[in-house]
Image: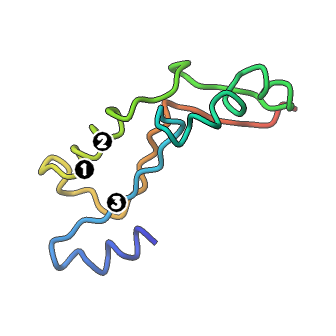
Amino acid sequence: MTNHISRDCWNQNVRVNCIAPGPIATSFLDGVSNFCFQQDFILGKGLKYSLFPHRIGKPEEVASLVAFLLSDDASYISGQTVICSGGMTFARNI
């Protein structure tokens, strides 16, 4: 959808991008973080846990990405989904 809308808006000098955040320390995550993002819980469910920075992201880190995408430095970026997750991946343990 992001790519399609960006193609429709490109001639109007409008850039359209999407940010896909991982776990970010916000009130949304407060009720979930103690349950879902503990390493012991995830490993106990047969999942391999990998969070490269070994921490939850900060709202300021996502805000910095937004500021970059709004800047002239990102004038050639449109129709993209930018993943801001600290390298987090979930994969089945086999």
User: Which quadrant of the figure has residue 33?
Assistant: top right
The three-letter code of the residue at mark 1 reads: Leu
Q: CA distance from mark 1 to mark 3?
A: 8 Å
Q: Which residue is mark 3?
A: 17
Secondary element under disc 2, as helix, strand or loop, is helix
Q: Is residue 64 left or right of residue 34?
A: left
User: Which quadrant of the figure has residue 52?
Assistant: top right
The three-letter code of the residue at mark 3 reads: Asn
Q: Which residue is mark 2?
A: 65
Q: Position of residue 91 (x, y in %)?
A: 74, 36
Label disc, if present, on residue 23 of the rendered structure: none
Number of on-image labels: 3
Say whether disc 1 or disc 3 marks the residue closer to the N-terminus.
3
Q: CA distance from mark 3 to mark 2?
A: 11 Å
Q: Are marks 2 and 1 in contact (CB under 8 Å)?
A: yes
Residue at image position (71%, 33%) is 36
Q: Which residue is mark 1?
A: 69
Secondary element under disc 1, as helix, strand or loop, is helix
Residue at image position (30%, 41%) is 65
Above or below, comparing residue 50 to residue 92 in the picture: above
Q: Are marks 1 and 3 in contact (CB under 8 Å)?
A: yes
Q: Is residue 17 left or right of residue 10?
A: right
The three-letter code of the residue at mark 2 reads: Leu
Say whether disc 3 or disc 2 marks the residue closer to the N-terminus.
3
Q: CA distance from mark 2 to mark 1?
A: 6 Å
Residue at image position (32%, 33%) is 60
Residue closest to the eye, 26 or 51: 26
Q: Position of residue 80 (x, y in %)?
A: 38, 58
Residue at image position (54%, 36%) is 23
